[in-house]
Amino acid sequence: MQTGVVDGAENNEPSYESGQHYRYAKYYSTTGHLIIPEILVFSKKTWETLSKDDQALITEARQGGAAGAAQALVRAREEVDQEDA
């Protein structure tokens, strides 16, 4: 996508964020055509290495289900955009 060879892709929200696809694909459509449950698993040791802000963001996304995850994704993307500006 970054090179312009591909102008679109199909993926889930966590991959869109973790793969930083939002840097190159500015639009994301939630179609609901395929819904696979996503789970987050952390060891206690790993969880404790996260900042309190990151823990809160993950907890909020988990509690809000898909809608909470989408809102958390938007906020994270806005933070990256601000860092890039």
Image: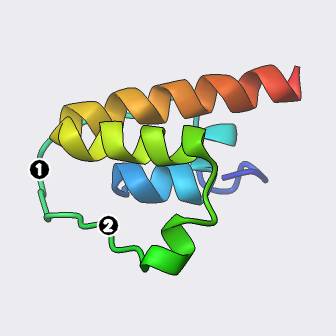
The local secondary structure at tag 1 comes to loop
**Left or right: where does residue 23 sit relative to residue 34?**
right
Label drawn at residue 62 = none
Q: Nearer the viewer, mark 1 or mark 2?
A: 2
Does the rendering let one see residue 28?
Answer: yes
Most foreground residue, 55 or 83: 55
Q: Position of residue 46 (x, y in %)?
A: 55, 74
In the rendered image, the quadrant that contains the C terminus is top right
Residue type at numbered disc 2 = Leu
Do the numbered discs 1 and 2 sit on residues whose CB atoms are within 8 Å?
Answer: no
Q: Is residue 62 left or right of residue 8?
A: left
Which residue appears at 37% of the width and 55% of the height? 10
> Which residue in the rendered view is the most extreme toward the right?
85
Left or right of residue 17: residue 70? left
Image spot of residue 66 (x, y percent)? 20, 41
Q: Is residue 36 left or right of residue 51?
A: left
Q: Residue at x 41, y 74 (%)?
A: 42
Residue 9 lies in what quarter of the image? bottom left
Q: Earlier in the sequence, mark 1 or mark 2?
A: 1
Residue 66 sits above or below residue 72 on the image: below
Residue 40's disc is 2
Q: Is residue 85 above or below residue 60?
A: above
Circle 2: element type: loop
Q: What residue sits 21% from the left and 31% below the top?
A: 67
For the residue carrying disc 2, how many other residues have a C-alpha within 10 Å: few (<14), some (14-19), or many (20+)? few
Q: Would you say residue 7 is visible in this rendering?
A: no
Residue 33: numbered disc: 1
Q: Amino acid at mark 1?
A: His
Q: Nearer the viewer, residue 48 or 11?
A: 48
As drawn, 48 above or below 23: below
Residue at image coords 72%, 48%: 4
In whole angstroms, how far apart are the C-alphas of marks 1 and 2? 22 Å
